[in-house]
Structure formats: C-alpha cells, structure tokens
Amino acid sequence: MIDSYLDTRQLEAFVAVISIGSMTGAAKALGKSQPVISRLIQDLEKDIGFTLLHRNGPRISPTAQGIAFFSKVELLLGGLRTISQSCRHIEKAAGRAMEITAVPELAASLAPLALARLPEPLFPNEVHIRSTNCENVIAAVLARTADIGLVTLPVDHAGLETHWIGEVSHVAVLRHDDPLVHAGLLTPQHLAGRSVIVPARPHPLRVELEQSMGAESVEIGGILNSSSAHTSIAMARAGLGIAIVESTSIRALPIRDIAVLPLSFHIPFRWAVVTAPGHPLHTNVLQLIDALEQAAFALPDFCKLNSSTQHRPEKSEPAFEEA
C-alpha cells in the first residue's frame, strides 16, 4: 500500500527504461549509472507493491501491470513538465505555452492544420501536442495539464466543456495497383474474401464494420488489427489488405502509391473539442478552438454536429481522389 507520494526520480527512471528499452540506454539518457537506474526501479516496485519489469539478463520487458502503470506515469510526468514550463514563463513574464492533448488521429492531422491558422500575434511561444488515448486526453483536460483536448466519441463523462462536435466518414485505402481502385465506390460485396485492416475490438470502427458486413451477409477474408490509422495506411500501401480509416489522416498526411475510395455504407468518425469546466480560457486557446473548426470545414465530407442532438446542420463538400 502506498502511504506517501512516489519519488519522481523513480518514475522518470521507469519511463526512460520502457521508452528506450534497456537499463543501459535509460542510464545514458538520464546521465546516471546503470546500477542507480536499476536501484530506482527496484525501490519503485517495492513502494507500489507489484513487479513492473520482466528481467531476463540484459533483456527486459514490461509486465501487464507495468504497461498499465506506464500510461499513468507518462500522463503525470507530462503534467509536471507543463507546470515547469508555466513556471518559467511566469518567471520571465513571457508568453505562455499551449498544451494540446489529442487522440492520435487528430494529433497528427487536425491539430497541426489548426495551429497553422493562428494569427502570429496569438501564436504561443511554445506548443506541446501530446498524442495519447481518449482516456488520457480526458484525464489531462480535467487535471488542467492540457489547455484543450480532442477526444473521439462517445465519451462517457459529463464533466467536460464541449465546444463543438465534428464528424467525417471512414474511407477505404488500397494499394495503388489494387484491382478495386477502378470501382469508384467500395461496397460490402467488394470486401468479400478480402483481408481488411481495422482496429481490434471493441473499437467502434470494428464493431460498425462487422454490423455493416453482417447486414449484407458478407464474409471478410481476414482481419489485420492495427492500433493507428497511419499504421493501417502503411499496411495497405504494402498490399496487405484494404484499410478502413477516418479521412482526416488521409488529408493531413498524404501518402504516395495508395488510392482512397469512399464507402457505400456510412461509418462515422466523431470527435469533440473539449476543455476543463468552469475554467477561464486564454485568448489563444479560444482562437485555437475557432481555428480547429475552420480547419475541419476544409476537410472533405466534414459535418459539424449539434452537441445535444448530433444532427448535422453544417457540412463541407465530399471530395475523394487517388493519392
């Protein structure tokens, strides 16, 4: 049982070992000796009461508990870094840093596009974009270690201030020389017997795809699981299958030698722009919220949803072509 605050030196050592993959590499990165790093992690395991690492000579790997603990520690240290940056800005009376925390699909696409729209006088001196899972985005926003969060829906948390909700369609990504490239529109029948690249269950995309295939009595040839849209796109480019991904990743980071086709069945990708409740927002944060919306409307097939009814009153024009 933990009856006191954990030592941040132990936490930093643990994160370094997991991130780098070895005690020796972590020691070099932190400017400490390997025995010191090993001792810090042993003391941490003693303090928390469970084993974090499997040790097999020089090779190490995280335990299941270590993986779960790592995500929490990474979030905590990210918050501490934000506080440290804020203190330096206060000391120097300089412009504040902006912390954006987002799910990977939006951290790599919508966030950079929106930042590019900020007027120069309102652009922060420093910007941190942190890519993490939806649970950690919510935790960072509520802990106010992030100024703004981009989360995928549905979100089961009433304590967030939702500024707007957006939606785009999922699309199919194929290798440029795939025979289906000339189909123009991908139907469930086109997927019959083909390998499909999607996230593992219970991801909403996987569930909705299976429902769409079941409604047409179509059997997919096989499933390749991927934890990110960009990995799915890379797998499709290698000819491993047809990737089903949200269209924001395609538009923000175009990739050669692929083709993008719309689906005849609609699988939505919905997200919300959120901040901490009851917390006054800095001018550049408000400006970024507007810039995110402007950047979203520049995406093909974007719909802005009503936050209460999720109707689609505003929509951009669809436009899909070979990348």
Image: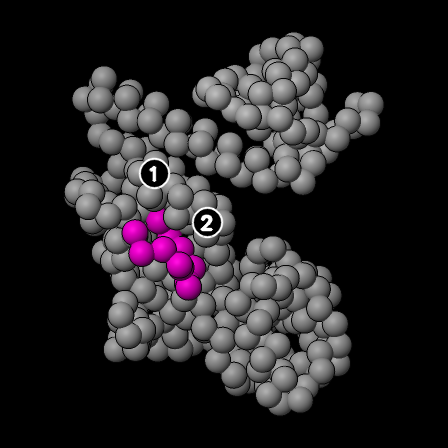
Left or right, 122 with respect to 101, comes to left
Res. 19 mark: none
SS assignment at label 1 = loop
Where does the magenta region start and end?
Answer: 149-159
**Total numbered labels:** 2
Above or below 68: residue 230: below
Earlier along the polypeptide chain: callout 2 or callout 1? 2
Quadrant of the rendered image containing residue 92: top left
Q: Where residue 108 sits: x, y (%)?
A: 46, 51
Amino acid type for the residue under numbered disc 1: Ala
Q: Residue at x 69, y 36 (%)?
A: 63
- Tell me the crowding category of disc 2: few under 14, some 14 to 19, or many 20 or more residues within 10 angstroms, Cα based: few
Q: Where residue 278 sits: x, y (%)?
A: 19, 46
Quadrant of the rendered image containing residue 13: top right
Question: Which of the two residues, 210 or 180, is positioned nearer the viewer here?
Answer: 210
Q: Residue at x 40, y 59 (%)?
A: 155
Residue matched to label 2? 135
